[in-house]
């Protein structure tokens, strides 16, 4: 896959290759797309933020757009490319103002 296959603030069901090389299903919500990777919330694993290399994503199974009022927000500093240079995941809570949280 490549960057152009994804859009921020959209829900995806994907098949990806984990660090051991096994194919895994995942539900993700991308926040920021960079040239080599994206930062996305794993919506099916306690909301962990994770860095996904586009090469590790094998297939997009389902795409669900998210209405603007239901989008989740995280500060830009947390999503900055430099902040993700040495990490693969981060635990971070966020919610949508529309959801009352």
Image (cartoon, rainbow, N blue to C red):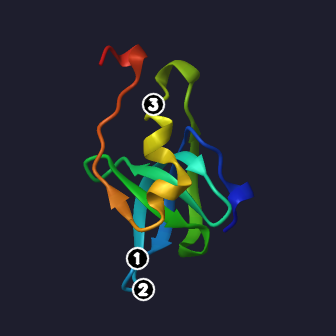
Please report whichever mark, 1 or 3, sits nearer to the chain's N-terminal start: 1
What's the mark number on residue 21?
A: 2
In what element is the residue under mark 2? loop
Between the C-alphas of marks 1 and 2, the distance is: 5 Å
Q: In which quarter of the image is residue 98?
A: top left
Please report whichever mark, 3 or 2, sits nearer to the chain's N-terminal start: 2
Q: Residues within 10 Å of mark 1 (few under 14, many from 20)?
A: few
- Examine the rendered structure and indicate whether residue 53 appears above or below residue 92: below
Q: How crowded is mark 3: few (under 14 residues within 10 Å), some or many (20 or more)?
A: few
Question: Residue sitting at 41 percent across and 60 percent down?
Answer: 26
- The residue to which callout 3 is attached is 73
Q: Quadrant of residue 38?
A: bottom right
- Relative to the observer, which residue lies in front, 29 or 33? 33
Disc 3 to disc 2: CB gap under 8 Å: no
Between the C-alphas of marks 1 and 3, the distance is: 26 Å
Question: Residue sitting at 36 percent across and 47 percent down?
Answer: 43
- The residue to which callout 1 is attached is 18
Question: Residue sitting at 31 percent across and 46 percent down?
Answer: 47
- Examine the rendered structure and indicate whether residue 86 appears above or below residue 63: below
């Amino acid at each position: 896959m490549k960057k152009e296959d994804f859009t921020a603030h959209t829900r995806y069901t994907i098949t990806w290759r984990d660090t051991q090389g096994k194919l895994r299903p995942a539900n993700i919500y991308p926040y920021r797309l960079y040239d080599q990777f994206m930062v996305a919330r794993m919506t099916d694993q306690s909301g962990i933020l994770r860095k996904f290399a586009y090469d590790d994503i094998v297939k997009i199974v389902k795409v669900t757009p998210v209405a603007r009022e239901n989008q989740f927000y995280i500060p830009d500093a947390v999503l900055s490319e430099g902040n993700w240079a040495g990490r693969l995941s981060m635990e971070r809570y966020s919610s949508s103002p529309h959801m009352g949280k």
